[in-house]
Image (tube, rainbow, N blue to C red):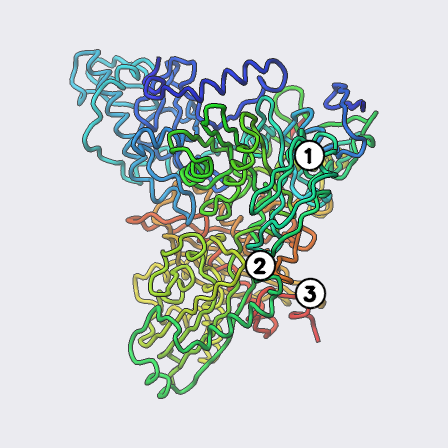
Amino acid sequence: MIKLNVNGRVHEVDVEPEMPLLWVLRDHLHLSGTKYGCGISLCGACTVHLDGQPVRSCGLPAAAAAGKRIVTIEGISEHGMHRVQQAWIEHQVPQCGYCQTGMIMAAVSLLEKKPRPTDADIENAMTNLCRCGTYARVREAIHAAATIKS
Amino acid sequence: MTNRAQALKSPQRRDFLKASAAAGGGFVLEFSFPFVARAAMGRPATEVNAWIVIHPDDRVVIRIARSEMGQGTYTALAQLVAEELDCDWAKVSAEFASPNENVRRSRVWGSMSTGGSQGVRSSQDYVRKAGAAAREMLIAAAAAQWKVSASECSADKGVITHGPTKRTLRYGQVAAQAAKLRPPGDVALRDAKDWKIAGRPLHRLDIPDKVLGKPVFATDVVLPGMLHASIAQSPVFGGKVKSVDAAEAETMRGVKKVVRTEDFVAVVADSWWRANRALGKVRIEWDVGAYGQASDATITAMLREGLADPKIAEARRTGDVSGAFSSAAKTVEAEYGSQYLAHATMEPQACTAWVKPDGFVEVWTSTQDGMASLSAAAQTAGVPLERAEVHKTMLGGGFGRRGAPQDFVRQGVAIAMAMRGTPVKMMWSREEDMQHDFYRPASLVKLRAGLDAQGKVVAFEAKIACPSILEVLMPGAARNGIDFTAVRTLSDMPYEIPNQKIDYAMRNGHVPVGFWRAPGQQNGVYRECFLDELAQAAGKDPLEFRLAMLKTGDKNRLVLEAAAKAAGWGTALPAGAGRGLAVVEGFGSYAAGVAEVSVSPEGGLKVHRYVVAIDSGYVVNPDTCAAQAESNAVYGLGALTQSCTVRDGRIEQSNFHDFRLPLIGDMPKVELVLVPTGGFWGGHGEPGILPFQAAVLNAVFALTGKRIRSLPLRKEDLRKA
């Protein structure tokens, strides 16, 4: 049994220690907001926060996440929407939407570290892939979210 | 019971609800699909007509027959219905129409196919009429209640007012009565200049759930007792399963079954990761058939042989081509080519299927064509269409991958047949997805043009060799050896060139090809790059050269002028920057683009700006159109450098490390100039990509003097010598 603290709740899951966190979240805890895109820690669709840091959960063994604070898209805001989600709606960022939860997780993390990120900061932090081409709006929405009071 | 519920009598849908509820607390009850048809379930809502459900509290649910893959059709169609319905947009939601019901209700929702930028343009007429008819019925119901003439009543934002007495009734109050009325025979549609809901940049209906991470995609489906499957198909296209040793896999944790068919092996387990891990331990021997040695070299040789074929098929011939060439002052010749490309949707192919004990088949999938999915499911299960249902989910990208083929539905249902009674969610790994696509065709095109002494094009010849998409997806649809998707943009040029000969050599090979965003788009790349070559040979400005060949009033001319003006064609650029343009019509619209680029000393291309002008006749949502322009630019940008290469009969690329997508820093500034001239309905999902690559490559030439004729573009092509 592995104990995982996800969105403030502790879950005991009976999984292989090497099962990537992504699959524990999706198939065992039914938190499907975190997506599978590549399985090789590249595309970022599976981005979650681990002790406040953005990580690609498809490459992170569940055992390595034990005892750490895991936050998923379902847990970034206790009441209503996170300011990043608000900005995402205001700027109509998503198209198909599949990569967007990972994008939002990366953006939330960026803004926690750099409340007023520059374009260069955004390019460094936002390494998520989007096939629909939402990048310009992602950038705009991050700048906008930076001005919204949390 | 609502009209719809009575009409439905759908035991399957009720069973699903019961099963979901019976499975009890926790996730199953929390699980709900925001977009799956459910408007009338358990609520006293009224179906006024097949497209419109109205709740007593005035909430309006609009049924959408086409699919949503990011392009915004879901919202645009709802806007068109709401425009004519005169309801309150703030109270509008949408849901997908059911393919099973569509069959049982005499195809009341028509086509569900979503490709070729058709979503809005080919259904706008009947969905607007549905909205207008419902409005008339609602007004008539209120008039009847007041015992006044309907002509004295009007509707606005879901409220009907009797003019003389100022009495009002809300839609929710009269919907039940309205539904009992006979629909009006014919209804007048509003002129676009009077639109209040359509034509405006309203927020998309699907975005709130998407930013919250709600389960909206096929891969998010959870059903009671559901198992997961991962699949392996022959790495060489067309190969068959020869032998399977699943002894080790079957003992692995969570594995329930190893399913073997002629074409694939699938492991079914209690989580996808376990299924996929065990699949890696199944020893599969493939009978790869005749194509185990195929490679890029054999494919290029096949295409080259096509170019030389004396029996090449004629797609178009006008005037006296050989005569015009022999009297031409100058002849320009060039060969263009490009390779196969994957769609690489971010959500891999997926299908959840459940074969009920009574044989009824239910499917949840990301599909561009609900009816094609229904057919594939019913056919695979051997049941009539009425005994199958497809729950359409939001698509994690489509771009043509999820329409015609329906391979994933056939596989999902085949797996579920082997697990009868248990729902199974099949999802492809990224590697499987990259290597089992229906690729954009590779192509090789020889272009030749003759110019007279004044630099006017008098003769144009094209020989096109490439696989036929129609031959793969709709055998028999290609007539006289011509697949229109293979020759378009060359066989139907808007340019006034008196003597033309356009030939096509269909050379199919073994790599499956399919509709890939703007099928045939490569011809636009070749044509518009070649036009620049001709302009150069004629010593003319690329814009002036094209305009001189376009008739007054031609909409290609209009968009070209609009793009050139917005981009500042002819104005100075900063040092190190180049500008290029192109114009291509397609998918009902006219599109012209101007690109600004720079090239690093190492040969890295950067596209800074892409101005694209589009005339789509009408514009339903300018913001989703802008998003599509941005999307097309990024898709086109990727296509400049991506390739799917073939070795030993298989696709070499396997994931995003070797099939690279542009990153946020690569995104150009995209400016859409909408020039809707009315009178026709064009699309937006694809037109924006049509001029993109040629505009970029023409800009590269303007900057570096290097003419790129073969894609993918490699760094070494542009590196400073």
Q: Secondary structure at mark 2?
A: helix
- Measured from the top left, where is residue B555 in percent x and y? 34, 59
Q: Secondary structure at mark 1?
A: helix
Q: Which image quarter holds the C terminus of chain B?
A: bottom right
Q: CA distance from mark 1 to mark 2?
A: 46 Å
- Residue A120 relative to residue B621: left or right: right
Q: In the rendered structure, find residue A130 and report the number of the disc placed on it.
A: none
Q: Chain of mark 3?
A: B
The mark nearer the N terminus, 2 or 3, is 2
Q: Position of residue B175 (x, y in %)?
A: 30, 17
Query: Residue under mark 1: which chain is it in?
Result: A
Residue beneath disc 2:
B289
Task: Relative to B323, say whether B171 is above or below.
Answer: above
Amino acid type, callout 2: Gly
Work out whether disc 1 and disc 3 sit on a shared chain: no
Q: Amino acid at mark 1?
A: Met
Q: Which residue is mark 3?
A: B600
Helix, strand or loop status at disc 3: loop
Residue type at numbered disc 3: Ser
Crowding near pointer 1: few (<14 within 10 Å), some, many (20+)?
many
For mark 2, name the chain: B
Where on the picture, by quarter, is residue B30? top right
Residue at the disc numbered 1: A105
Task: Classify mark 3: residues with Cα within 10 Å, few (<14), some (14-19) or many (20+).
Answer: few
Q: Quadrant of residue B423?
A: top right
Instruction: Tell me: A78 left or right of A63.
Output: left
Mark pair 2, 3: CA separation: 45 Å
Residue B411, by quadrant, is: top right
On the question of residue B702 being in view, the answer is no
Q: Cα distance, mark 1 to mark 3? A: 33 Å
